[in-house]
Amino acid sequence: MSLIVQKFGGSSVANAERIMNVANIITETYAKGNNVVVVVSAQGDTTDDLIEKAKEINEKPSKREMDVLLSTGEQISIALLAMAIEKLGYPVKSLTGWQAGFVTDSTHGSSRIRRIDKERLNNELDKGNIIIVAGFQGINRYDDITTLGRGGSDTSAVALAAVLHADLCQIYTDVDGVYTSDPRIVPNARKLDVISFDEMLELSSLGAQVLHTRSVEMAKKYNVNLEVLSSLTRKPGTVIKEVVDVEKMLIKGVAKDNNVARLSIIGVQDIPGIAFKIFSSLAAKKINVDIILQSVGRNNTKDIAFTVAADQMDEALEVLDDLKKVMNAKEIVYDDNISKVSIVGAGMATNPGVAAKMFEALADAGINIHMISTSEIKISVLINKEDCNRAVNAIHDAFIV
Ligand code: ADP
Ligand code: ASP
Ligand code: MG
């Protein structure tokens, strides 16, 4: 008997009709003789709506209370989906994250899973029940509710597949697989039948939200058999696996990230220890820095610019404002009206023409580049947000036909 983990995202359970559709997929899988463990997200825009509700009351609520609030979205979904499966006449139990044994660390809002206590899950499977688990949530060692960060239900699903040694982990979503770029903004995007863990990891971390980055990390680590497919069309999706021996494309995909802010500290002294001071202060506040650019020194001063996630901009600004006084800097400049667009593919470093081709595509589209960063497997540029979709299309069409 096989064990299959199936995850359904927010749009797949957005209303009663979609929930019945999902219930049919689950019970068909069960009726074929499989054990089925399901993970669901909050319905439609529920998580965004809950965030808005919180802001109406308090602009800066504590992260602990945000987790208490946001976890309710998934709790609604598990109950409704279990009711749909009951109606179809199958044995089913819904479980919240903590009932399902998810123990996380205490970083509210972006917790990491420490372990999954399997006892309850195994009991329910032994009884022949279909299990519906609330994604995105767990409990820390103080018995407080935690959440895994936006998009975290994918990680709940892969984690379950790993600890239960599932034969397959299916991520059902609103597109029928992983594409060479977001099919909603790039009409020429191509569906990939297969993609490697490493390439998927880059695409996800550079902004392709189709899979939560940590779910891909975990799938690679525990060698989970992972597939992305649509809950609406019954077609084969995209398989994510270790080695890909199919068609060798140099460029695997183009990703965009709108959750980016650029901060610059202008006119700091051109002496040793300045970068250390800035970035260690940011690290102390757990602020993740991405691209860093330092200007050539002149008149004994220099400028340092860097990017952070837009939702960490305010925290980063507080750190810089404190440093400005200590370091005698001239001014702090910031901008969150920007996007990062990246190309991903193996062997970038050994193909010198790739960067030039990417910049040519942007130049032809009349798009200005603010910052550039390159590595073995990706090239990223920072551009104005309003140019983002045009840039993704221009770059995509230059490399992928
Ligand atoms: P879910 O609610 O099912 O978790 P998400 O909205 O988190 O769904 O992720 C699916 C979305 O990811 C798609 O609707 C698509 O717009 C977007 N997306 C971005 N990049 C890609 C890509 N390379 N391939 C497929 N989808 C992508
Ligand atoms: N509901 C959560 C979110 O919207 C988790 C998820 O959908 O994966 O981010
Ligand atoms: Mg998602």
Image (cartoon, grey):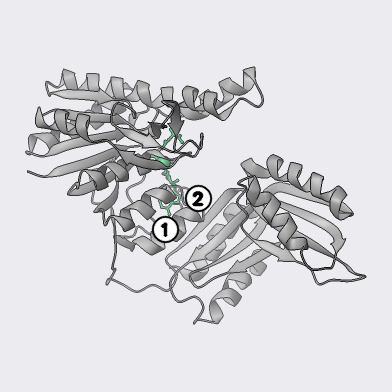
Ligand 1: does it lie within 8 Å of the C-beta at label 2?
yes
Name the kind of residue labelled 2 in the image.
Ile
Mark 1 or 2, closer to the camera: 1
**Element carrying mark 1:** helix
User: Is residue 111 or residue 187 the one in the foreground?
Assistant: 111
Measured Cα–Cα span from mark 1 to mark 2? 21 Å
Above-or-below relation of 134 to 358: above
Can you give x and y, in whole percent of width and height, for residue 27 in the image?
A: 15, 31
Q: Quadrant of ligand 3?
A: top left
Looking at the image, residue 65 sits to the left or right of residue 25; the answer is: right
Question: Mark 1 belongs to which amino acid?
Answer: Leu
Mark 1: give few (<14), some (14-19) or many (20+) Cα within 10 Å. Answer: many
Where does label 2 land, which residue?
A: 185
Q: Are marks 1 and 2 in contact (CB under 8 Å)?
A: no
Residue drawn at point x = 28 percent, y = 55 percent: 222
Neighbour class for label 2 at 10 Å: few (<14), some, many (≥20)? Answer: few
- In this rendered view, identify the residue nearer to me: 132 or 16: 132
Kindly identify the residue that appears in the image at 17 percent across and 18 percent down: 87
Residue 270 horizontal/vertical position (percent): 84, 68
Name the residue: 68% across, 55% down: 280
Image quarter where the N terminus lies is top left
- As drawn, is 189 to the left or to the right of 4? right
Whether residue 249 is visible here, answered yes or no, is yes
- Which one is nearer the viewer's eye here, 79 or 99? 99
Q: Is residue 68 left or right of residue 102?
A: right
User: Mark 1 or mark 2: which comes first in sequence?
Assistant: 2
Q: Is residue 25 visible?
A: no
Residue position for label 1: 201
